[in-house]
Amino acid sequence: MTTTTTAKQQIKSMYLWMAVVIVIAVPVLIFMNANYGLTGLIGGGILTIIGIAACYEIEGRGSDRPARLVTYAFLALIVFAFLFPIIWMTMTSLKTAAETAKPLQLLPQIAQWKNFPEAMAKLDFQNGLSNTIVVTVLCVIGQVLSCSLVGFGFAKFRFPGREGLFIVMLATMMLPGQVTMIPVFILFRSMGLVDNLAALIIPAWFGSAFFVYLFRQFFSSIPNEVLEAARVDGASNWRIFWQLMLPMSWPVIAVVTIYTFIGTWNDFMGPLIYMNSKEKATIALGLANFTGKYGSTDVHLLMAASLVTMIPCILVFFAAQKYFVESEFSAAVKG
């Protein structure tokens, strides 16, 4: 009963927060439009107060109402501050080139939906998307497999120098990427991997110190008796890892997946260094060329292309967030 009540309260609070953000966002957007001026400011302030007060009346109970009201107002402003860049990007993508020159005019006079197909055509979206998907998917698979395997070895196998090697591996996190950039480029150039997508994929299959650390900590929390029971049943170390440890570590896999996906999808430096031809360009590299080729007069097209390219990252993030919530809830119930 307690769990059900808590879940209902969380759902209720979620819808209330959505209402507050909408109520706050709408008047601010109206105010930012130069056509409303001071009227928009006054109306925005009134509607904001009404929205927070409504949330306060529905949610707030007891003697802590003033503190709750101040907290909600402060958090609502923070939420809007984080959402405003996305709102601005969306509104700009629907403007004409002339309207982008007016910074105070946030809302377009007429939504220009044709900006999206035009931006995709100029970006060579299909080619960039296919290259980016290939690199991102293979990098995610490589990071999960390599980091989980190394983390399993550090967590469940005892061998001379294990702790020292683990410390050395963690110490590599202090090396900035610029230190290894030139040596790695020289190595890949000698291997003939310049202008080859393999140059962006191969490093992911050699693991990441941070992800190895995550897997190692997770595997260390699993009792050794579980592995011994599997060995008694005749399971080899590889079978224990593949059929027992890896399926149990899906919360860590979700973390590694979302970080690797977003990092690889938005990677600009790697493609800039290794990719020379237009056929091997990724989406991030295409967006940079978009700016240099079409200049600031086509900001609306650049925002339209950027808005489309960020959608997969948002979807992956919310998909992984769902698994995070489920894992925490199941752990709390079992505890």
Image (tube, grey):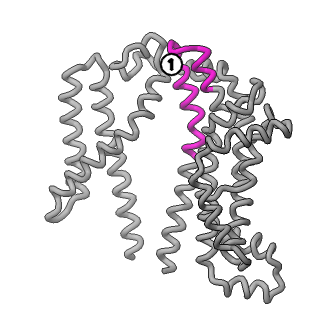
Q: Position of residue 107 (x, y in %)?
A: 38, 22
Using a 10 Å C-alpha cutoff, classify the residue at mark 1 as few (fewer than 14 neighbours), some (14 to 19) or many (20 or more): many
Measured along the vertical axis of the image, is residue 140 above or below residue 95? below
Measured along the vertical axis of the image, is residue 144 above or below residue 200? below
**Lateral position of residue 148 relative to residue 77, left or right:** right
User: Which of the two residues, 325 or 133, is positioned nearer the viewer here?
Assistant: 133
Provide the secondary structure element on which disc 1 rests: helix
The residue drawn where x is 23% and y is 20% is 37
User: What secondary structure predominates along the stretch shown in magenta?
Assistant: helix
Measured along the vertical axis of the image, is residue 188 above or below residue 276? below
Q: Is residue 156 visible?
A: yes
The residue drawn where x is 50% and y is 19% is 299
Q: Position of residue 265 (x, y in %)?
A: 63, 40
Q: Which residues are magenta?
A: 287-315
User: In the rendered image, which residue does mark 1 sit on?
Assistant: 299
Query: In which quadrant of the rendered view does residue 45 lie?
Result: top left
Q: Position of residue 123 (x, y in %)?
A: 65, 22
User: Which of the two residues, 147 or 97, is positioned nearer the viewer here?
Assistant: 147
The amino acid at mark 1 is: Val
Does the magenta-highlighted stretch encompass residue 306?
yes
**Lateral position of residue 96 relative to residue 25, left or right:** right
The residue drawn where x is 54% and y is 67% is 327
